[in-house]
Each structure stands twice: as structure tokens, then as C-alpha cells.
């Protein structure tokens, strides 16, 4: 939204950018609104961030979007491995521990990256592309 500050930000525009249906975009926007991250007015295409970019972390966004209906692991262990197999019979708890550690590290990283950081990186890439043209 911050990158497209002057544009009409419709669900069609967002869906074409991120590659999902407009219906899913509206659902995600609802989750972000419920989490207090965006403000929307029905019938307008002008969503606004509810807080400063520097005060919204990727962790905030993750919680709003991925865990709006309860906690979900980032990684899933295949529950259908063969318990009679030397590997399949032991891999689930081993991978579960590795995945839990990876998720904990990811959440720490998400909590240290703000939306402002992401917008700055996008603007830098756009500026670099403009210089190359």
C-alpha cells in the first residue's frame, strides 16, 4: 500500500501483484484489519496502514495472516511415513525438532524486520532498475 500510495488499491490490483484471487485478497485484508494493521472503508479502494511502517513487523503480519484461525507450524512433518522402515519409523520426531527450531528462528527474524524495511528494499530495487533504463 505504501509503494502504491497514490493509486486506487483494489483487490484486483493486489491479486495481480501477488498471484492470488481477489477473493483471497479481500480475506487477507480482513485478517489484517482485524489485527489492527490496516484500516479500510467499505466501497473504497484506499486501504491505509493503521500504524507507522516502522511499528509493524513481519511477525505481526504473519500472526494476522497465517495464524488468524489459530497457530500453524511453518513446516509440517509427513505423518504418513512407514513406521516399519528404518528411516520412516524414526524421521518424524527428528524432523519435528529441527522444524521447531527453524520456526523459532524464523519468528525471531520476523520480529526484527519491519514493513518499513521491506518497503525500503522494494524502493531501492525500483530505483536501481530505473538507473539501468
Image (spheres, rainbow, N blue to C red):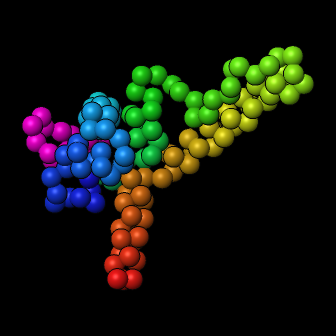
Closest to the observer, 132 or 36 = 132
The x and y percentages for residue 9 are: 19, 50
The x and y percentages for residue 34 are: 29, 30
Q: Is residue 44 magenta?
A: yes
Residue 25, placed above or below residue 1: above
Q: Residue at x 42, y 65 (%)?
A: 121
Q: Residue at x 39, y 34 (%)?
A: 64
Q: Is residue 46 magenta?
A: yes
- 98 with respect to 126 (left or right): right
* Total numbered circles: 0
Q: Residue at x 28, y 60 (%)?
A: 3
The x and y percentages for residue 112 are: 51, 51
Quadrant containing the C terminus in the rendered view = bottom left
The x and y percentages for residue 16 are: 30, 49
Query: Magenta residues, as a range?
Result: 36-49
Magenta region, main secondary structure: loop
> From this viewpoint, which residue is outermost toward the right?
86
Tell me if residue 127 can be seen: yes
Residue 58, placed above or below residue 95: below
Residue 12: quadrant of the picture: top left
Tell me if residue 50 can be seen: no
- 37 with respect to 108 (left or right): left
- 66 with respect to 18 (left or right): right
Q: Residue at x 57, y 35 (%)?
A: 74
> From this viewpoint, which residue is outermost toward the left?
43
Amino acid at each position: 500500500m505504501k509503494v502504491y500510495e497514490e493509486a486506487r488499491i483494489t483487490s484486483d490490483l493486489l491479486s495481480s501483484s501477488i498471484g492470488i484471487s481477489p477473493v483471497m485478497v479481500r480475506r487477507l485484508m480482513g485478517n489484517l484489519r482485524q489485527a489492527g494493521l490496516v484500516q479500510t472503508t467499505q466501497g473504497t479502494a484506499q486501504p491505509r496502514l493503521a500504524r507507522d511502517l516502522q511499528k509493524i513487523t513481519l511477525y505481526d503480519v504473519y500472526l494476522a495472516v497465517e495464524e488468524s484461525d489459530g497457530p500453524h507450524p511453518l513446516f509440517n512433518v509427513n505423518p504418513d511415513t512407514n513406521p516399519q522402515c528404518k528411516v520412516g519409523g524414526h524421521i518424524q520426531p527428528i524432523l519435528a525438532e529441527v522444524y521447531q527450531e527453524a520456526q523459532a528462528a524464523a519468528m525471531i527474524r520476523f520480529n526484527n524486520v519491519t514493513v518499513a524495511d521491506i518497503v525500503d528494499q522494494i524502493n531501492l530495487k525500483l530505483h536501481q532498475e530505473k538507473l539501468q533504463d
